[in-house]
Amino acid sequence: MQIRRLLVLLLVICGLSPQAQSQNDVSGRVTDARDGSPLSNVSVTAKGSRTGTSTDPDGRFRISVAANATLVFSSVGFNDKEVKVTGASINVSLEVAEKNLQEVVVTGYNTQSRREATAALSKVSGESVKFQPVATFDQMLTGKAPGVLIQSQSGQPGASASNITIRGKGSVLASTQPLFIVDGIQVTGADFQSINPADIETYTVLKDAIATSQYGSRGANGVIVVTTKRGTNSKTKINYDYQYGVGSLPENKLLLMNSAEKILFERTYDHPYGMNFFGWTDEEADSLSNVNANWENVMFRKAKTQQHILSLTGGNDKTRFFISGSVFDQEGVVIATALKRYTGRINIDHTVNNLKIGLSTFVGSSKLTNTSENDQWIGDPLNGIRWANPYVTPYNADGTYNNTDMLLQGQPNGLQELLENPRVNNQLKAVAAMSLEYKFAFLKGLSARTNWGADFTDNSTTRYVDKDTYFGSQQTGTDGSFSRGSLKRVRYTGTTSLSFARQSGDHNYRISLFNEFIKRRTTTFNYTGFGLTSVFGNGADVTPGTPANGFIPTVADDQTEQSLMSYFALADYSFRNRYFINASFRRDGSSRLAEGNKWVNYAGIGASWLINEEAFLQNTKWLSELRLRVSYGSAGNEEVGDSYEARELFTGATYNGLGGLVLSNLEKPNLTWEVRKTFNAGIDFGFLENRITGTVELYNAITNGLYLNRQLSGTNGVNSILTNLGKIRNQGIELSVSADVIKTKDLTWNVSVNHTYNKAKVMALDGTNENISGTAINRVGERPNSIYLVRYAGVDPANGDALYYKADGKTTTNVYDPNDRVIVGTYDPPQFGAFNSSLSYKGIELGVQFNYIMGNHIFNNDRGNVENPAYVISNVSRELLTEWQQPGDITNIPSPYSNFELGTTRFLEKGDFLRLRNVMLSYELPTQLLERAKISSVRVFIQGQNLQTWHKFKGYDPEVASGLLAGSQYPQLKTFTVGINVGL
Amino acid sequence: MKKIVLFFVAGMTLSLASCKKDFLDLSPYDQVPQEQAITNEAGMAAAVNGMYAQLRSINLYGRSLPLYGDVMADNAFISTTNSNRYLAEFNYTFISTNANSSATWASAYNAILRANNIINSDVSSTNSNQLKGEALTVRALMYFNLVNWFAKPYTVDPNADGVPIVLTYDALLKPSRAKVSEVYAQIEADLTSAFTLLTSTSKNSSYVTKYAARALQARVAQFKGDWATAKTAALDVVTNGGFTLATSANLVAYWSNPAPVANKLETIYEVTSDAVNNNGSNALSYFYDQSGYGDAICADDLYNKYTATDVRRNLFITGTRGGITVRIVNKYPNTNSAADKDDTKVIRYAEVLLILAEAYQRTNDEVNALLYLNQVAQRRDPSFAGFTSSGTQLLDDILLERRKELAFEGMRYLDLQRLNSDVARVNINNNYVGVTPVTIVAGNFRRIFPIPQDERDANPNISQNTGY
């Protein structure tokens, strides 16, 4: 300081003051190019000098610069702009940054510019996917982010969340679903049916450990951070969206017999039940052969979907708001299944001096009527469709339900089960968060922030089981039942942090210290009453129970709690704005682990180097971006077992009408979380002024302490105990490239591709070499969850026996022996990806998206059910018409006298598919037309979802998340939608 | 810089203060941690009740055990119109992955674990001896079933591989099989100490008493061919137990009563089910009752062995299934009773009398043998003048009386095992078209269940039964 003062003094004395002669005062205003609202805190510097200032809350600035200076305006989230000084006043509008280094990205608890972030993350804008006709927002991310595999097995309205796998499954027993954070609050993935996807501004998928380590015990499966829309500093804008769609079932590739075929099969094929086991006479056979029961026509329909969304956004420099409301009404393709949803949101931001207050409140209410799926129970309506004999009609001539099939073959009337046993789920969902952020005046760069919020769910389910249905006959007292269930869950998240950021010459750093509390409480209450009188059609039908009538209601009441307490620190450092380091450290204490073992530590470090800004590449014009990123760190997976998994517990049991206690959980004092350590290396590149951009990521993730059920000798009285046994490795490569093939004023065409390859391997199982569970095996050196079956070798033409390969793979035998099981594939897709094309000409836009999955297998138990000769009394696969009947028959269907074995590759099918996921054609009306009507924008669109899927799976759809289709498939629909969007 | 540090500290302290110390210390709502479970008499009594509840499992007395005993023998057959259950057992096609026998293995050892937890607890109070005695008896009963279903009969080869004996919980234990004789020794030891610990009173017949342990001792000795012990134990029950046989007029009523009794009529020990806690459609009764699955039907051969005046004939209903006239088992008639469900008898007084008769016959006291045999036979058939046979004919009469008396209670197959006899299914039903094997010779490898594949996968020390 002393020296500088001395210098200035010296210069003044010498009359050489540099500021005196050619300096100009320049002032002006910086606004947002989108809406003209003022931008504060924009940095304004003179190029090539250290002179600089920043804009005030009104976007105004004043600076003294040399006459010919060039001013550089930069702000995080906006493209930099350079303006040559020509006069005393300069007004500038900045464009929002997209796909470049100034773009703001959420990197976990903080946001950074993409330049500063070292993490591997994918950002998807909510706007780009919000019109997809799916009920839950997770499905919208399909194909949008490399490394993120989204499998939605169900097309049922309000179906539970998709299976989302980020960078391969790092766990076998624990959940592999990512953590969901909405506006800083952890939310439950299963409740997405009640969230309005149109409220969402961005989705950010955090994939590598520098990002996920920030979430400690919850981060191992990756994190999806959702931010909702906030108000803007502008006049109030009103937006209205409407859409209408019609969905239908995809093609069914598992064909069953029609009436004529089934009658022929029953009467002329040999069965263990005897030929013509129902004893049809010729006349009966003739008349039944002509019956076309057409169960599909009565149980399926064209499913209509309608949606209205209204939103308001606006504000001033002090207060900004975003308000929205929506109504969503979706029919299921199966009659009587539907989802109705109403949502409302108010997001408010307010600034008082140095204090910023943010409020996000969301309420959603939904009513869902559904049916069970993916099981193999005869009472399941969707199985009823498959298994009912085709010559048995749903209704009798007098309009009553036809139960002939129940008497004949023990198959209840699926339509009756569906219509008379309604399952209704009402959900009330609220997500609310409030944040306070304070910038300390006494020390520039020091701020404190606290964010508290809750995810609240109230599920109320009712289930009426009519006494005349099959399911009703199975209830206590055989006269139906009525049950009402309630689930209330509150999870609050409170995060408090102190942050210090400072720039000093070439050095730029920020340190944040955090403290977080998360606690979840779930209370459930269920009541089931029996002996329905069928008068009211609701719970009032329940007959009060007495020991004499036996209609004693059952009541269940439970509560679970779990908590997580954490301390963590994040640090960012950059040098010359080209070299970046991010670091994290977190310490998590959990209520779920045993005393003395509750705390687990996580850490991560990441670095990046912006190579293209090095002097030696400054003049390489074709290269607009080249960046290398590396990170390493750890994150845990706590989603395993019960809330009290580590403790030895006893639970109630009743005998002789008296209460008892039984061991319900074994003590696990050493249980800890699975820890996934991920190394990530990524290259971001951009060529030709970023017309071609892309990213390549390589990762190597090792899960240590893998949870497995250590198989115990059954002589212990228990078969297995959850143990941190093994080690899994996931290695992979993610590639994404986007190219603006055509970029002119009126015509643009962008093409993008992403592909992921993931290779998983079991590294260790703690002493044992393999761990078998059902049809899956974990064996050291192989993929986790490998499929372990006896190989089917066709049919012996001589005697019709099913043949199987021995373990050696060469010899065949007609004896099914579990010792001949070998690994025949994997349930988890190793390769998947998507390609998108977006063409726009003036106001017309055409977007096309394909996605694909390769290399996995599906166990088609649904087909097994209809090829099993034990079930020929109900409807069976058309394939059975080629059943072996006499020596010399060459066929793939064994004789019905050959022992039927399900656990063979006979029912294993390839899961590969290519899907035309989405096609959208939209037209934005020219603004000149609208101005007179005082409408700022109108957009109309037509959209097709899942229009075509190319696959060889014998069923409706190959998107089977678990790899095992038990039965009763409710597939994703093929949907056409039209819509309009109006902005006022 | 000092100020920054000050603020960090202040901020964190503030956060910490907002949390209680026990933030991470949460307790379950509907479960009791071990440190509160079997630590007092109330907890121990509750654990005993939990142990009994396990016996109601469909893999044990809830269905499988009594069902195997008749469906795998010559008493019951599974109709061709069936629900696809127990076909592997009926047809003798089971392999090491067989679901039912594997589940029986696991469930029996789970009952043993529950018993072990009680036997090994430190509680010492007024009734702790009684409670421990009940656990010892249940443990013995489970080992008796395990060794008879999964190992060769003692009477054939006492040195054959039995089943592992596990008396304390150790998760990492991978035990090998004890000899059949060693398992029997354990069973006898448990029953002997149970007898000394137990009292002769209980809440009702769904709980083990002193004489239940004694009656089981008699059965175990019978299965060993230790006739002296069988005689002593059975005679003790007869003399001191206070049990009575149902009168001829009361027999049907006795069987249709679904509730446990306290009057010592017939039942020495049974596993109870009630209106709320029962196996529903998985219950044993559901498998016989034509309004349930009704898959299992009485073989004509057995039915024809009851004389017209034998009141036990009234425990059958003549009906049709799959268009065929059949005899339907009606020992468990409460399938549709909402108020209570059928219990499963584990041991009855009639069995003790027949054990005693057989023990006298085997020790050449035919007078006493006839005395106790006729107590049962004449009570069941009031018009019957009584047996007067001798020698092997007397033994055959006793065994036939056992078959008729204990039919559909699961003892038939075990008797055939003990006697090393073939299963000979004659005259199942005139119109029966099933594909079942008619004769399964003694010594066929499938006459005992395979050690479950799961167990073999998890426990390298366990050997498989020959043939599997």
Image (tube, rainbow, N blue to C red):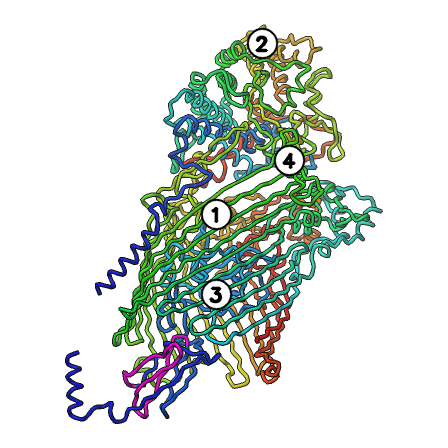
Q: Quadrant of the C terminus of chain A?
A: bottom right
On the same chain, marks 4 and 1? The answer is yes
From the viewer's perspective, tell me whether residue A96 is left or right of residue A526: left
Do the CB atoms of the residues marked 4 and 1 lie less than 8 Å apart?
A: no
Magenta range is: A48-77
The residue singled out by tag 3 in the image is A347
Callout 4: SS? loop
4 or 1: tag closer to the N-terminus: 1
Query: Whole-Å distance between the Cαs marked 2 and 3?
Result: 92 Å
Find residue A522 and name its label: 1
Which of the two discs, 3 and 1, sits closer to the camera?
A: 3
From the viewer's perspective, tell me whether residue A18 is left or right of residue A614: left
Asked if residue A901 shows in the view, the reply is yes
Residue A550 image point, x, y percent: 64, 32
Report the amino acid beneath label 3.
Answer: Asn
Callout 3: SS? strand
Which of the two discs, 2 and 3, sits closer to the camera?
A: 3
The residue singled out by tag 4 in the image is A544
The residue singled out by tag 2 in the image is B369
* Letter of the chain that mark 4 sits on in the rendering: A
Report the amino acid beneath label 1.
Answer: Thr
Query: Whole-Å distance between the Cαs marked 4 and 3?
Result: 48 Å
